[in-house]
Image (cartoon, grey):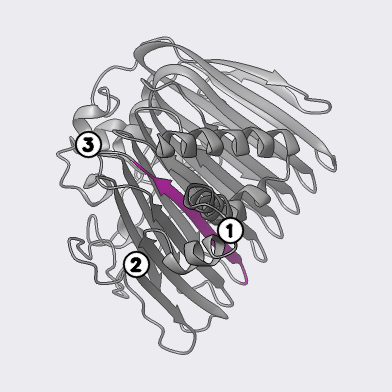
Amino acid sequence: MTDTATHATGEKARIGAPSISGFTEEGENLSPMNAKASPIGGDAVKAHSHGGGAGIPDSSRAGRKTSYNVEDFPVLTGREEDFRFTPLKRMGGLHKNELTGVAPELSVADANVSTMETVAMSDPRVGSAGIPEDRISANAWKYAAEAKVLTIPAGSTGEQVTLTYTGTSTEAAASHLVVVAETNSESVVVIDHVGSAVLAQNIEFDVQEGAKLTVISLQAWNDDAIHASAHLAKVGKEAKLKHIAVTYGGNLVRMTPSAHFGGENGEVELFGLYFADAGQHLEHRLFVDHATENCKSNVLYKGALQGKDAHTVWVGDVLIRKEAKGTNSYEANRNLVLSEGARADSVPNLEIETGLIDGAGHASTTGRFDDNHLFYLMSRGIDEKTARRLVVRGFLNEIVQQIRVPEIEERLAETIERELAATDS
């Protein structure tokens, strides 16, 4: 078992990624010369394609390039910090090809007060919550023929909408979705991905003042699917975003959720659960940008993996800018390796540019079964196979409980059982 954890408070808190064999420390320059990033989204930023801040390229998250134009990003080589774990040869050309295939069909269920529109990419709501942060996301922006906009009306409560992407083609395609949670609304949005696809996708979440939005994104693709999805969120004053990513399908899935605070007293919770089988590559790269005062963020991702060449990647970046006084932030990743031949990479990064925070920390753990847990269960008459299943279910249940949508929890429990049955055989 390997475990690394860091926590900091006080006047001169400065935290970088843990020193783990095989990892570099790129992306952790805490120089005060990093410039403040420009505001997020909107026509003003579109007019100036480089939405991000200045600084040393590819180092601090404050200095990473952001742009709506794919031409502003260099051709990928695999040596870039954001892609050093990603097998580009398996990306289906999403980072370099024309994305002119048929995108998965989007269907809407259970919408009571919400509305879904199809709009042009020039619609002012498109780009209001975020700017592409890598070449794949920018390529998707370029080739998306239109955008879907889901609007949850101001002041509405109890809304639960299910959006299902059903893929029927393996030609490289692009799609774009904007979810607008208007002022003081409270809602749950389930985004389900099924079928076969080679898809570069952008999803924006505009969580306006006082709104509470829960997002459950399920990557339940067929075994041949390739999916790169950028989730770009702007969280307004006193608003709350709870984002849960559940990934177990597909050949290669790469998710990049980013949350940016646009007003004081905002709160972000990012949870994730992934289960990788032989040959699967499941990658999650997160970014939480504390750019204003008195905001909170909590990140917890848990994964299990089994089988030859099963590979999971988790990278968590938290940036606490100079102006983000009163920040409280914590991120953690836990991985459980169930068999030989599987590999989990985990890199938590934390940058702090002010000491006037309430607290910040990060942790990462990767290991095999806890022998003490197994011994405890087996000493009470439970056979080893059943004991192992109980340990895995207990390990993942912390995330399952966060979903709080009974039909999704039941479906996920059945999926975990199928995965564990494959381990037994």
Give whichever of discs 1 and 3 has the lower sequence position: 3
Q: Amino acid at mark 2?
A: Met
Q: Earlier in the sequence, mark 2 or mark 3?
A: 2
Residue 6's label in the rendered image is none
Q: Secondary structure at mark 2?
A: loop
Rendered position, 333 above or below 168: below
Name the side, left or right, on which 251 lies relative to 330. left
Please state the horizontal and vertical placement of residue 303, each as a whole percent of the image.
45, 50
In the foreground, 104 or 291: 104
Instruction: Please check the rendered image and state whether residue 298 is part of the magenta-colored stretch, yes or no.
Output: yes
Residue that badge 2 annotates: 1
The tag on residue 381 is 1
In-image side of 352 versus 347 (left or right) = right
Counting from the top left corner in percent of width and height, residue 424 is at 43, 39
Q: Which residue is mark 3?
A: 87
Magenta-highlighted residues: 294-306
